[in-house]
Image (cartoon, rainbow, N blue to C red):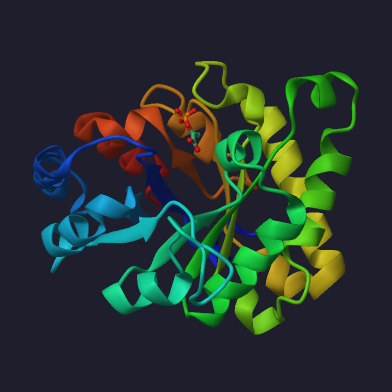
Amino acid sequence: MNKALRKAVIAGNWKMNKNRAEAKALIAEMTPLVKDAGCEAVICVPYTNLETALEATRGTNIHVGAENCHWAASGAFTGEISAPMLAEMGVEYVIIGHSERRQYFGETDATVNKRMRAALDAGLRVILCVGELLDQRESGITQEIVSMQTKVALGGVTEEELKRVIIAYEPVWAIGTGKTATAEQANEVNHGIRTVVEELYGKKAADGLTIQYGGSMNAANAEELTAQPDVDGGLIGGASLKAPDFAAIVRAASR
Ligand code: PEP
């Protein structure tokens, strides 16, 4: 697998953090620190910060994403935000299927697939999250779980559309826990995902697909994780809320 065929992407997932003033300050601090990045830098922010983030990143190399979108373009879905609404604002990326959505908000592989469809139809780039629970890893079914999540999520996605998809392998037991998968574990699962994508779309598409690792990635472990042959950057939660830490991860993933 040739890493040069695909871009490394470091994406911050701010989750439900930062008010508008804090968002502005964090982006202002981060901007000079990542301006020479040798990988793509993305911040996925709460809906209430999208406008602020778009404004604050204008003319910089920082891309902006949302943390979710609904599968319908519009309609009676109180409290939801649609993919065309995000696209119309100028948002470029959206996270789909994060484990916190699956765990706390009833997200299933089927609804992940519907949101994927909506996001691609709206012209967005998708960061698709997949990953196993601790008991699934302990039962030795990690690869089966992650393969199934990947296959269902990509149902109906064409090879051309796949160019706008990134997959983030995020073992659920490693998210926000301080427990990181070893570099070997991350690479092994990412390699398995790439193999599934190769079965579905062929070698060229699989070789070109960015597959991130996410789960307690930080300034200290980013270099080893992102150096793995099948790890193309990361999805970063906690460490993306501190500009120096996020910038250090961006530097580690720069090639
Ligand atoms: C995440 O939210 O996707 C994540 C990886 O969080 P953390 O880095 O805090 O584990």
Q: Is residue 47 above or below residue 18?
A: below
Residue 163 visible in the displayed image:
no
Q: Is residue 172 above or below residue 232?
A: above
Relative to 10, 38 lies left or right: left
Residue at image position (67%, 57%) is: 112
Residue 84 point in image, percent of width and height: 43, 77
User: Depth check: 93 or 188 in front?
Assistant: 93
Residue 172 point in image, percent of width and height: 64, 29
Counting every numbered tag in the picture gives 0
Residue at image position (33%, 48%) is: 46
Q: Is residue 221 above or below residue 34?
A: above
User: Depth check: 156 or 84 in front?
Assistant: 84
Residue 66 point in image, percent of width and height: 39, 56
Residue 198 visible in the displayed image:
yes
Which quarter of the rendered picture does the N terminus lie within?
Answer: bottom right
Residue at image position (75%, 38%) is: 188
User: Depth check: 169 or 86 in front?
Assistant: 86
Q: Is residue 45 above or below residue 180?
A: below
Residue at image position (80%, 60%) is: 152
Residue 186 point in image, percent of width and height: 66, 34
